């Protein structure tokens, strides 16, 4: 956000040092990220002076050149070779002296140097309009009036405006500082100046460029483009005119602003009262649309806004001065009453930027009898825009709900100065003052009269109060603040203060970010100055709890485990669409979501990973393996629950295509093998049966637009990182031969190997070192719903060679266990 330092000084009616203001603002929370100089003319005409041509003779070696001597106020005149056809002795001209930088439109700047032109010495350049940036003509040199003082700096003669521009990195909560008035309030509090108000500001209208500069002559023709008159006007607390030092405009404007009647002018209503609290419409007639005065054009250009005409420039000026977005409609192009409502199905709107958008039923609009005329809080429509033929205006000063404006701006990909401020909150109670201020400014620069205003208040403004205790402030800040200093700071920021040890504060209407005691503490501390807190001379260190280091180390172990197996770590947005989850799910909804696709907090990491798979599929990936460690959220009866989880998703080919191995897709058992190995690596107490490995549902695959099947597992990190309680036992590797026995069982198809494995463990067979599946068979001659599963049992002893009798005895015991649990032994 760009802030003009000269504009700030005008509001504060003080001359300050830009660097000091920038430093104090940055320390207090409004960080000045960049400072740059701005001039109304390129280079501020440095090195350009007013001179008088003393002599003008033809160049001896060039028919089109003239050799001149020019008095620029030095002890000796300058010798200058000039090619302009209209140069003559006795003229007052502008001279670019040696060292001056000339910047012509569309050309590279060049420096004036002492040189010889066809043998004649030239110590400068007599300038045309375009060579100074004051015009576009290059037909001849610019000739000034004869009464101009020789040696006058051209910058002073042409009224070059210089300014310093602050680029402020505004945080999202400081909507009150999104204007020059808002920043000026902070500056006033930091420097102990009176609190600036809109009503006390003097409009810098008709600012004099140079009182002596009443006319100029070019090629012998009088030109009155540079003459201006002087006059400033002030508004009181009600926005009434307090007078002027310019008799020329005092009568008409004073009468117009004093007579500011509240009456029905065309009918204003708010149909969407929950999303718009207050709407003011002001009717002006008899205005003349024309270019803005120089002071206004300079102010806007300094902060990066190109002037258009006096009416549009006035609305931009008021927005950047007050932080309240306003809009001007051509009243003649509006039909019937004006209402704030939601768009209806099938409605479109042609915007001021030339785009035509299809409106959503969630878009708040300003409509007349014919349909939408503006996208509320964002941009006006072209059908009712101000043009050079406009004479009657309908001015809008309104409040719109921040979330509604944000959603519409996001939906239509439109970011404007107006939406920026509505999204951060405006001064709800200051809108009528802004209406007076805007009306006054337009009357000052475009003429006309105020026919009246009408307003519609859907929700009355409620004053907000808060109580703080000085003892709690001191405990929070770690130092004792003087009570009178605390009260002074709060009053300087616009708070109304009552009480002594316990203070009751009425919060300023423009401070939407202040709602808690700690917010007030922060305001006091930042204005008092963090650098003003005394040092005790002691260093106090709080030793942290380092238990989290072990947790991080184990999380890094998980990362390395999957990366070693060809996985990539992903990080997806925590905000997703509610469409991913069944209706009635305990979702955590956002109050002001940016869009419907980001309306809830995720209940699972799987949807985001599936979208990442689809993204890679669309780029011809053959295999995608991803893992993510993040939080999932759900609403509970007592509040909200956050659960850190590990989610792993795999899709596509198991191995890269090769002659060495057949092509196959990654499957359930691949995922099971990875997770089993991870559990073993972590020495986790989690059972593989409780891991929850599953094929991703068809519904989710379809929504994510993933082709084929994907396998996923989502494990709470707390369970995964919980260590196993089993004591680690070490034993030497057996030096004796082992023995293998095979057994085929017929069981129900639903019986998993894990269930059989559990039976083996419960049997406590001696010398059994491992059991594996080596074959699974389904179909005839087996009964429907049955399967044959073949197991290998491995035996070994550490004290001697395993005997057949020992193995046979163990197998008998195992067969009895299986048969007792419903299995049929295939013999």
Image (cartoon, helix red, strand yellow):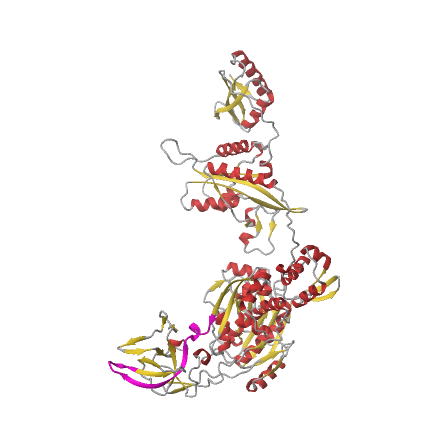
- For the point 38% across and 79% down, the residue is 95
Which of the two residues, 322 or 20, is positioned nearer the viewer here?
Answer: 20
Query: Looking at the image, which residue sits at the far left?
Result: 61
Report if residue 40 lies within the magenta region.
Answer: yes
Which of the two residues, 341 or 397, is positioned nearer the viewer here?
Answer: 397
Give x and y (percent) for residue 240.
63, 79
Q: Is residue 552 above or below residue 810?
A: below
Specify the principal SS of the magenta part. strand
Give x and y (percent) for residue 740.
49, 18
- Whether residue 376 is visible, yes or no, is no
Q: In this view, does 594 lie above or below 680?
A: below
Q: Give the range drawn in magenta.
A: 38-66
Q: Quadrant of residue 89?
A: bottom left
Q: Is residue 371 above or below residue 649?
A: below
Which of the two residues, 485 or 746, is positioned nearer the viewer here?
Answer: 485
Q: Quadrant of residue 342?
A: bottom right
Report if residue 761 lies within the magenta region.
Answer: no
Which of the two residues, 294 or 306, is positioned nearer the viewer here?
Answer: 294
Q: Is residue 320 above or below residue 477?
A: below
Give x and y (percent) for residue 513.
63, 61
- Whether residue 173 is visible, yes or no, is yes
Give x and y (percent) for residue 430.
63, 70
Q: Quadrant of residue 748?
A: top right
Total labels: the figure holds 0
């Amino acid at each position: 956000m760009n802030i003009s330092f000269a504009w700030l000084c005008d509001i504060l009616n003080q001359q300050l040092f830009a660097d000091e203001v920038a430093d104090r603002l940055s320390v207090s929370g409004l960080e000045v990220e960049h400072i740059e100089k701005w001039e109304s003319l390129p280079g501020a005409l440095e090195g350009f002076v007013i001179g008088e041509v003393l002599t003008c003779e033809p160049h001896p070696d060039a028919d089109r050149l003239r050799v001149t001597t020019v008095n620029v106020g030095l002890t000796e005149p300058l010798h200058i070779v000039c090619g302009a056809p209209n140069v003559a002795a006795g003229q007052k001209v502008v001279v670019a002296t040696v060292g001056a930088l000339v910047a012509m439109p569309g050309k590279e700047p060049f420096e004036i140097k002492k040189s010889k032109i066809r043998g004649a010495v030239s110590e400068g350049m007599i300038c045309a309009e375009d060579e100074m940036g004051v015009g576009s003509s290059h037909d001849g040199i610019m000739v000034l009036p004869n009464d101009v003082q020789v040696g006058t700096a051209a910058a002073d003669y042409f009224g070059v405006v210089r300014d310093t521009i602050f680029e402020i990195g505004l945080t999202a909560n400081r909507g009150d500082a999104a204007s020059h008035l808002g920043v000026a309030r902070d500056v006033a509090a930091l420097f102990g100046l009176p609190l600036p108000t809109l009503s006390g500001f003097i409009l810098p209208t008709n600012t004099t460029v140079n009182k002596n500069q009443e006319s100029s002559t070019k090629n012998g023709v009088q030109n009155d483009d540079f003459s201006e008159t002087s006059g400033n006007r002030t508004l009181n607390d009600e926005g009434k005119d307090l007078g002027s030092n310019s008799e020329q405009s005092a009568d008409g404007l004073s009468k117009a602003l004093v007579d500011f009647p509240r009456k029905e002018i065309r009918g204003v209503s708010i149909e969407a009262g929950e999303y718009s609290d207050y709407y003011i419409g002001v009717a002006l007639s008899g205005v003349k649309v024309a270019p803005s005065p120089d002071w206004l054009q300079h102010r806007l250009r300094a902060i990066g806004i190109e002037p258009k005409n006096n009416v549009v420039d006035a609305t931009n000026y008021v927005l950047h001065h007050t932080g309240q977005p306003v809009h001007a409609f051509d009243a003649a192009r509006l039909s019937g009453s004006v209402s704030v409502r939601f768009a209806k199905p099938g409605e479109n709107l042609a915007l001021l930027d030339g785009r035509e958008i299809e409106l959503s039923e969630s878009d708040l609009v300003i409509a007349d009898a014919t349909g939408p005329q503006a996208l509320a809080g964002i941009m006006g429509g072209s059908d009712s825009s101000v043009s050079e033929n406009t004479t009657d205006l309908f001015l809008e000063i309104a409040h719109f709900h921040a979330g509604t404006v944000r959603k519409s701006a996001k939906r239509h990909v439109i970011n404007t100065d107006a939406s920026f401020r509505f999204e951060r909150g405006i001064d709800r109670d200051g809108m009528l003052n802004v209406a007076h201020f805007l009306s006054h400014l337009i009357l000052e620069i475009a003429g006309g009269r105020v026919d009246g205003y009408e307003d519609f208040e859907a929700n009355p403004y409620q004053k907000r109060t808060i109580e703080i205790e000085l003892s709690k402030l001191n405990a929070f800040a770690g130092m004792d603040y003087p009570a009178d200093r605390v009260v002074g700071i709060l009053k300087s920021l616009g708070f109304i203060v009552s009480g002594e040890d316990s203070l009751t504060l009425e919060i300023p209407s423009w401070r939407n970010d202040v709602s808690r005691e700690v917010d007030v503490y922060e305001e006091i501390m930042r204005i008092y100055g963090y650098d003003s807190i005394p040092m005790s001379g002691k260093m106090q260190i709080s030793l942290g709890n380092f238990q989290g280091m072990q947790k991080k180390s184990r999380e890094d172990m998980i990362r390395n485990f999957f990366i070693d197996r060809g996985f990539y770590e992903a990080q997806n947005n925590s905000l997703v669409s509610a469409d991913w989850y069944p209706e009635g799910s305990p979702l955590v909804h956002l109050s002001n979501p940016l869009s419907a696709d980001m309306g809830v907090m995720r209940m699972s990491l799987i949807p985001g990973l599936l979208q990442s798979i689809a993204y890679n599929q669309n780029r011809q990936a053959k295999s995608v393996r991803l893992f993510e460690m993040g939080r999932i959220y759900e609403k509970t009866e007592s509040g909200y629950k956050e659960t850190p989880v590990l989610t792993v998703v795999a899709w596509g080919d198991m191995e890269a295509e090769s002659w060495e191995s057949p092509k196959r897709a990654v499957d359930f058992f691949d995922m099971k093998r990875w997770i089993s190995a991870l559990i073993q690596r972590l020495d986790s107490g989690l059972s593989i049966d409780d891991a929850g490995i599953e094929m991703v549902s068809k519904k989710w695959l379809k929504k994510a637009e993933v082709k084929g099947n994907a396998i996923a597992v989502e494990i709470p990190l707390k369970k995964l990182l919980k260590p196993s309680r089993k004591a680690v036992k070490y034993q030497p590797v057996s030096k004796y031969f082992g023995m293998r026995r095979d057994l085929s069982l017929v069981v129900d198809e639903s019986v998993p190997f894990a269930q059989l494995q559990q039976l083996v463990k419960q049997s406590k067979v001696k010398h059994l070192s491992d059991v594996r599946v080596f074959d699974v068979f389904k179909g005839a001659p087996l009964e429907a719903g049955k399967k044959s599963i073949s197991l290998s049992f491995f035996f070994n002893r550490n004290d001697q060679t395993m005997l057949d009798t020992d193995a046979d005895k163990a197998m008998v015991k195992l067969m009895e266990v299986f048969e007792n649990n419903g299995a049929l032994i295939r013999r």
